[in-house]
Image (spheres, rainbow, N blue to C red):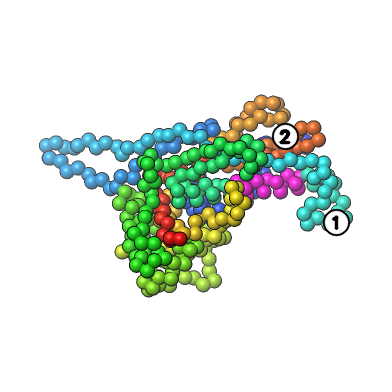
Amino acid sequence: MAIDIYKTKTMLAAVRQMSPVTSFLRDRYFPTGSGDMFPTEEVLVEYKDASGNKLAPVVLPRKGSISVEREGYSTHKMVPPLVAPSRPLTIDDLNKKGFGENLFSDRTPAERQAEILLQDLKDFDEMHTNREEYIAAKCMFENGYVLRQYADKYGEGEYVEYTMKFYSEGSNPAVYVPGVKWNEGASDKLADLYQMIRMLTTVGNNATEVLLGADAAEALLGDAKIKELLDLNNYRIGQIDPVALPNGAARLGRLNIRGRMIDLLTYDGTYVDEKDGKVKPYVPEKQICVTAPNAGRGLYGAVSQIEQSDNQWHTYMGRRVPRYWTEKNARELTVSARPLFIPRTKNPFISATVLGE
C-alpha cells in the first residue's frame, strides 16, 4: 500500500524525525517538558510565588504542632498565539529547476514534489524556531511580549496585537535601573550586578549567569576592576561545550561577585524585524539579564484544523502541525504551532539597560 506523504499524520512523523534548529534562548531558558504540550488550544499555567525561605515554627511542647499554610499559587488559563506560515506549490514550481540541481536534470515533477515538501517543512521549522527565539528574548528582557497577528500579508496591512504580560503592577518589577550608566566614568558595574543578583536570590530565584548584549559586554570587559576579577582559568582555548554553548553563544568568563560565581554569556543570534525589515539582535545591545538556566517553560497548545481527507476538524498535539490542502491546480502547505513561553516563577529574569546614548 502506497504511503500518502501529504497526510497530516505522515508529515507529523517526518517533522518529529527532523533535527531541531538550535535555539540558544529557547533551549537554555525555556525547556519543554513531557507535560508541557496540551491537548487543547488553551493551556493551564500554575504560578508559585517565589516568596523566600520560610522558617519552620517553634512551638510549645504541649502544643505539639502548628498548622502551616501551603505556599500560595495561582492558576491562569491562557491561549497561546497561532503561528502559521504557509506556501503554495504550483505546476510552475514542479517544472522549475531546483536549487543546486543540474541544468539538464531528468528529474520528474513528481520527484521534485517530495523534495520541495521536505525543504518547505525545514524552512517553516526554522521560521517557527526564530519566532520562538524572539518570544523567549522578549520574555527575558521585557517580562512579556506583544505580537502582531496579521490577517493577510505578513508584515503589511492590518493586524491585531496579541499581548502577554507576566506582571500585574503598573511598571515592570523585573527591571533594575543602574544609578550610573556603564559608559560613564563613575559607574560601579560590580555593585549593579550584585543588586540584580539579590533581586533574584532574596525571593528564592536562582542567579548563576548574566546574558550581555554586545555593547554591554564590551563595556564590562573594558573595566579595569572587572579584568582583575575575571577567572581566566575558565577559558578553554580550542574546546567548546556544544551543549552549553551552541552556535552564536559564548562564555566570556566567570566572576566572583561577593561569593557568587556568575558566568558571563553573550549571544549573537539575530532576526529580521517584521516592522522595518532590519536585522536586529535577540539580545539588545545595551541591555543585560541576570537569571539561571530553566528559569522559564516552553508550552504548546494543540492545533485544530480541517482535514481534506474527510472535511472534518481534527486536533493535534505537538510543536509543529503540518497540513496540505489541494485546490484546483495548486497545493498549499501550512505548518502551525501555538507556543507560549512563560517564566517558571515570578520575575526570574532581571534585566537592565546599562548603557546610555
Percent x, y for residue 179? Answer: 34, 59
Residue 77, disc: none
Q: Count the marks: how many?
A: 2
Percent x, y for residue 334? Answer: 67, 39
Residue tagged by mark 1?
A: 103
126 falls in the magenta region: yes
Residue tagged by mark 2?
A: 325
Look at 41% across and 37% down and name the residue there.
46
Specify few, some or many for label 2: CA neighbours under 10 Å numbering under 14, 14-19, or 20 or more.
some
Q: Give the range drawn in magenta.
A: 114-129
Q: Cα distance, mark 2 to mark 1?
A: 30 Å
Nearer to us in this view, 27 or 336: 336
Q: In this view, does 340 lie to the left or right of 207?
A: right
| Element carrying mark 2 | strand
Quarter of image, res 93: top right
18 falls in the magenta region: no
Examine the rendering and report whether any part of residue 321 can be seen.
no
What amino acid type should be assigned to the residue bearing mark 1? Leu
Look at 29% across and 47% down and name the residue there.
52
Q: Quadrant of the image for the C terminus?
A: bottom left
What amino acid type should be assigned to the residue bearing mark 2? Trp
Q: In this view, does 326 lie to the left or right of 345?
A: right
> Magenta region's main secondary structure?
helix
Q: Is residue 355 above or below residue 14?
A: below
| Element carrying mark 1 | loop
Look at 19% across and 42% down and name the residue there.
57
- Chain-order first, disc 2 or disc 1: 1
